[in-house]
Image (cartoon, grey):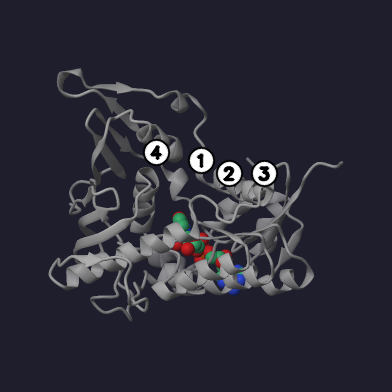
């Protein structure tokens, strides 16, 4: 029998973030990569990585073939349409980027359509942007820091409650294994240039903080962001016998209390740290093999993150009043920065601080 090969399409693979997905696919020994991108950059991006199958639009590809995996690395305003089209075409494993959608009902529709069609649906890379998230969750669940007593996002959500905040909210849910039952939120004025022109005070994306009531009865404190102090720790978990700080530079694990508290290195941190793109791709390939109906770091996870972000905004607008989840009204929305909604080719790459369009890269 020949070696198993996977056909993986990267839609938006000539974009700023999609180029990393394209490279991970092109670098993988068992993947036949396909580039789908509407920009004229696609020929050069594909050529540099030896990718030979190239399409301008997803429909051109789906008319010919159903790949094993489709990664939609697209502006948020259009990603949902392509996710749904993949599910309807019978693609087994589908991913998109973050935030999952503008409107909560759209996120619901994406998750439900994938489920109905038996597609495993993943979203973005939060689980790999801090090291060993799942191993750390299991280590905490094994009682290594005793009983969990508090959880925090110590730097708050300093830029966008949805656009970037969805990553920390997903990490917090991932490491605790808890859902959020209620929210008490506050917001700060939007950062310069981040307010979508069409957004009102309720729908604009902005920095945020608050308290999140988790299903295990614990409260996650999301501290008020302070501009003079960027905090590297994304999420911390405190127990009766220790504490964990999760951060991209390397997690800190402390066991013991008072004068006996000391840093420790759980066995799994000796292993190789898995970086976001290759790990995300591997996780999607494993879902093809296992027939899983959901992939870790899922569309469901990011739908929950959007719902929490919206609840924070609703609570802030109501004077920090407690808002319970799930939200009954699914028409609420958070309008992201125009770059996130429309993409660099429409909103301008400079609009979010890049020097210009992405540049093609070769193999490592
Ligand atoms: N840039 C980052 O650092 C970063 C980090 C994390 C997540 N993300 C997320 O990744 C997604 C994409 O962001 P980006 O920065 O790569 O944007 P981008 O505008 O650079 O990339 C989007 C790409 O999609 C292509 N495209 C647009 N419409 C298309 C269509 N209908 N069919 C095929 N191709 C199409 C564009 O030509 C472009 O190459 C967003 O959800 C964003 O929030 C970006």
Horizontal side of 224 relative to 327 (left or right) equals left
**Image height check: is 291 above or below 116?**
above
| Helix, strand or loop under label 3 | helix
Give the image location of residue 281, x and y in percent: 60, 48
The numbered mark, 3 or 4, whose residue comes first in the sequence reads 3
Check disc 4: other Cα within 10 Å, few if <14, some if 14-19, many if 20+. some
Report the Cα–Cα distance between label 4 and label 1: 18 Å
Report the Cα–Cα distance between label 3 and label 1: 14 Å
Horizontal side of 17 relative to 146 (left or right) equals right
Report the Cα–Cα distance between label 3 and label 4: 29 Å
Give the image location of residue 204, x and y in percent: 29, 73
Q: Quadrant of residue 13?
A: bottom right
| Helix, strand or loop under label 1 | loop
User: Closer to us: mark 3 or mark 2?
Assistant: 2
Report the Cα–Cα distance between label 2 and label 4: 21 Å
Q: Is residue 43 visible?
A: yes
Front one among 281 and 194:
281
Give the image location of residue 30, x and y in percent: 73, 44
Looking at the rendered structure, which numbered label has been put on residue 137?
4
Is the C terminus in the top left, top right, bottom left or bottom right quadrant?
top right
Looking at the rendered structure, which numbered label has been put on residue 278?
2
The numbered mark, 4 or 1, whose residue comes first in the sequence reads 4
Check disc 2: other Cα within 10 Å, few if <14, some if 14-19, many if 20+. some
Q: Is mark 4 within 8 Å of ligand 1?
A: no
Horizontal side of 344 relative to 184 (left or right) equals right
For label 1, the residue is 275
Q: Quadrant of residue 327?
A: bottom left
Check disc 1: other Cα within 10 Å, few if <14, some if 14-19, many if 20+. some
Tell me whether the residue at label 3 lies in contact with that at label 2, contact meaning CB atoms closer than 8 angstroms: yes
For label 3, the residue is 27
User: Residue at the spot x=39%, y=61% of the render?
Assistant: 304
The numbered mark, 3 or 2, whose residue comes first in the sequence reads 3
């Amino acid at each position: 029998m020949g070696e198993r090969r996977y056909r993986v399409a990267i839609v938006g693979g000539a974009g700023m973030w999609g180029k990393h997905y394209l490279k991970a696919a092109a670098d993988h020994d068992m993947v036949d990569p396909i580039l789908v991108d509407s920009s004229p950059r696609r020929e050069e991006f594909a050529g540099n990585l030896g990718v030979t199958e190239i399409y301008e639009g997803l429909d051109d590809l789906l008319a010919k073939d159903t790949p094993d995996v489709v990664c939609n690395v697209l502006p948020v305003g259009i990603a949902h349409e392509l996710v749904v089209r993949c599910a309807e075409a019978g693609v087994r494993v589908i991913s998109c980027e973050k935030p999952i959608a503008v409107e909560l009902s759209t996120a619901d529709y994406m998750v439900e359509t994938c489920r109905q069609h038996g597609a495993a649906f993943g979203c973005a890379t939060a689980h790999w942007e801090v090291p060993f998230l799942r191993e750390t969750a299991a280590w905490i669940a094994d009682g290594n820091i005793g009983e969990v007593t508090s959880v925090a996002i110590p730097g708050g959500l300093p830029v966008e409650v949805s656009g970037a905040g969805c990553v920390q909210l997903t990490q917090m849910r991932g490491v605790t294994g808890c859902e959020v039952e209620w929210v008490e939120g506050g917001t700060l004025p939007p950062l310069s240039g981040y307010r979508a022109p069409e957004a009102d005070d309720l729908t604009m994306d902005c920095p945020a903080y608050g308290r999140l009531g988790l299903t295990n009865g614990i409260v996650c404190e999301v501290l008020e962001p302070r501009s003079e102090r960027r905090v590297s720790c994304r999420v911390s978990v405190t127990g009766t016998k220790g504490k964990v700080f999760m951060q991209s530079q390397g997690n800190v694990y402390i066991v013991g209390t008072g004068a006996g508290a000391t840093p420790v290195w759980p066995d799994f941190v000796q292993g190789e740290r898995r970086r976001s793109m290759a790990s995300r791709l591997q996780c999607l390939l494993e879902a093809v093999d296992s027939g899983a109906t959901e992939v870790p770091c899922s569309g469901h996870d990011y739908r929950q993150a959007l719902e929490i972000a919206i609840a924070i905004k609703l609570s802030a607008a109501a004077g920090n009043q407690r808002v319970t989840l799930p939200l009954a009204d699914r028409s609420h929305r958070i309008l992201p920065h125009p770059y996130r909604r429309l993409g660099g080719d429409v909103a301008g790459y400079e609009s979010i601080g890049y020097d210009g369009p992405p540049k093609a890269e070769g193999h490592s």
